[in-house]
Image (cartoon, rainbow, N blue to C red):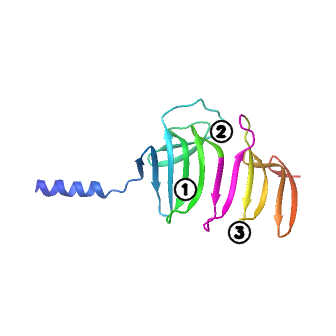
Amino acid sequence: MLKNLLTLSFILLISIPVNAQYYNGYVRIDSADRSYIFMITDNSRIISHTKYYYWFKSGRIHTTQGSYYGRLLHGTYKVTDTERHLLEEGKFRKGLKTGLWRTWHENGTLKSSCRRRFWLFGSDYNIREYDHKGNLIKKGYENSKRFTGYQVEWHNDSAVVVRYKKGILL
C-alpha cells in the first residue's frame, strides 16, 4: 500500500506542468501559442519612478513603473510562435529595454522596429512600421509612449507628413 502511494505521488509530481525552464543561462516560458526565451540577472539597480521595469517572478514576466519585485530581465529576449517563427526580438539592460527592438509578421516580414533616439538620456524612440509585404508605412518619433514631432505615413504612392506634440495631432 505504501509503495503504491509513493508511486502515485511520484507520478503526480512529474505530471505537473513546469511554467519556466532554465538552461545555459536562459529562461524559457511556453504558452499555448508562444514561447518566450530571455535572460535574467540577480543584480539590483537604482530605480527611476518614471521608467518601466521588466522582471521575472513565479514563472511569469511582469512590468511595473518605478519598481520591481523579482529578477530583472537582462540580455537577449526573443518571442517565437508554435512553429518557432521569430515574432519579437530585443535586449534588456537591468530590466529596461535597450537598443534595437523588432517585431515580425507571421509571414516573416518585418512588422516594426524601435530604437532609442538618444543613447544616454531621454525616452525618445525612433519608430518604423511595415506592412505584410515589408513596405515602410509609418515612421516617426515617440516620447513616453506618445508620438511627438513629425510622422510620415505612406498610403499607396503618396506620403503624408503629420505633426504631433505629446501625442496630440497639431
The percent position of residue 92, horizontal first and vertical second, equals 58, 42
The percent position of residue 146, horizontal first and vertical second, equals 76, 49
In the image shown, does 4 or 42 lie closer to the viewer?
42
Residue at 47% from the left image edge and 63% from the top image edge? 32
Residues under numbered marks 1 and 3 in contact, where contact means CB atoms less than 8 Å apart: no
Residue at 44% from the left image edge and 48% from the top image edge? 59
Mark 1, Cα crowd under 10 Å, few <14 / some 14-19 / many 20+, is many
In magenta segment, residue 105: yes
Q: Which residue is mark 1?
A: 79
Residues under numbered marks 2 and 1 in contact, where contact means CB atoms less than 8 Å apart: no
Is 114 on the left-hand or right-hand side of 157? left
In magenta segment, residue 116: yes
Mark 3, Cα crowd under 10 Å, few <14 / some 14-19 / many 20+, is few
**Kind of residue indicated by mark 1:** Val
Of callouts 1 and 3, the N-terminal one = 1
Residues under numbered marks 3 and 2 in contact, where contact means CB atoms less than 8 Å apart: no
Residue 70 seen anywhere in this rendered image of the structure? no
Which mark identifies residue 133? 3
Q: Which residue is mark 2?
A: 51
In the image shown, does 5 or 158 lie closer to the viewer?
158
**Magenta region, residue range:** 100-120
Secondary-structure class at tag 3: loop
The percent position of residue 63, horizontal first and vertical second, equals 58, 45
Residue 74 seen anywhere in this rendered image of the structure? yes
Of callouts 2 and 1, the N-terminal one = 2
Of callouts 3 and 2, the N-terminal one = 2
**Kind of residue indicated by mark 3:** Lys
Q: Nearer the viewer, mark 3 or mark 2?
A: 3
Is 35 on the left-hand or right-hand side of 147? left
